[in-house]
Image (cartoon, rainbow, N blue to C red):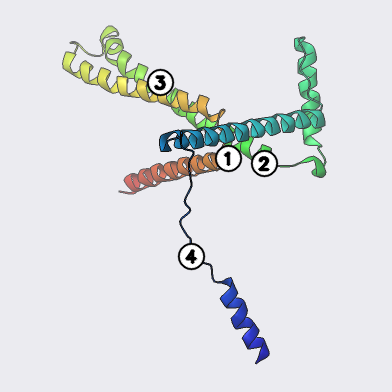
Amino acid sequence: MGKRRNKKNTKQNITPTPLQAVNINLPENMSMEEMQHMIACAIIEAEEIKAQKEEEQQKIAKEEWHRKIGYKKYDNIFLQFFNFIKSLKNILFLPKKDIKGDRASTAFLKSLLSTFFRGMKCITLFFGILLILYLPIQRIIGVINHFPGLTYIVFVLHAFLFLISSSLFRMLEVEIDNIKDRSYLFGLFTSVTSFISIIIAIIAIVKSA
């Protein structure tokens, strides 16, 4: 019985008290708008300090990583090349205790995404140029006798879409290296793999049909 009473008492003590409104007395010469402006400035300053600390931590982690693998920057191309080979050897035989964080997985995902966007950039650029040059080349080599102007306009419009897509994929390729939010990077990788899976499934359905 004593234990049950103690449990009931603890449950009653755990129940949160209802929140009460807090009245803030502002100075006589300060308006509510000025107080809101001060709070907004304080929040912005806190975010800037947080971002600066994160940047400093990343810089320290990068310097520590370069120290572990023996990476250094040289003005001489040959010295820089030999240092790169040395760093690569150290990475291959890096002790387990020195492997920290998710640097390798992040770099691997970035390389995969960059390769995908680079490939899509080249493919769309190729088809864009092909659509622009296809009919003129066919006319020059004598495959077609007359030049279909209306068809060529349609080809050019489609080529314009391919060239815009190529520019977009080029921007995505550049932006991948600037991504610092790892959760966003993993989400983007998941979206790309889902998109590729959908395309493969559509191709398989069309072929089977």
The answer to whether 102 appears left or right of 45 in the picture is right
At 76% from the left edge and 22% from the top edge, which residue is drawn? Answer: 84
Contact between marks 3 and 2 (CB within 8 A): the answer is no
* Mark 3, residue position: 126
User: 145 left or right of 204?
Assistant: left
Confirm or deny contact between disc 1 and disc 4 (CB under 8 A): no
Mark found first going from the N terminus, 1 or 2: 2
From the viewer's perspective, is residue 72 above or below residue 204?
Answer: above
Nearer the camera: disc 1 or disc 4: 4
Q: Residues within 10 Å of mark 1 (few under 14, many from 20)?
A: few
Label 3 to label 4: alpha-carbon separation = 66 Å
Callout 2 amino acid: Asp
Residue 182 percent across, percent down from the top left: 58, 40
Q: CA distance from mark 3 to mark 1?
A: 32 Å
Query: Is disc 3 placed on a helix, strand or loop?
Result: helix
Residue 143, x across and y down, in percent: 26, 13
Vertical order, 71 against 99 (above or below): above
What is the three-letter code of the residue carrying label 1?
Arg
Counting residues from the start of the chain, the first of labels 3 and 4 encountered is 4
> Does residue 37 sit above or below 140 in this rendering?
below
Residue 182's disc is 1
Q: Give the label, 2 or 4, closer to the camera.
A: 4
N-terminal-most mark, 2 or 4? 4
Amino acid type, residue under disc 4 in the picture: Pro
Q: In this view, which residue lies farthest toward the bottom?
A: 1
- What is the spatial separation of the Cα atoms under label 1 and label 4, in whole angstroms? 38 Å
Instruction: Count up the numbered dots.
Output: 4
Give the residue type at disc 3.
Phe
Residue under label 4, please give it.
Answer: 18
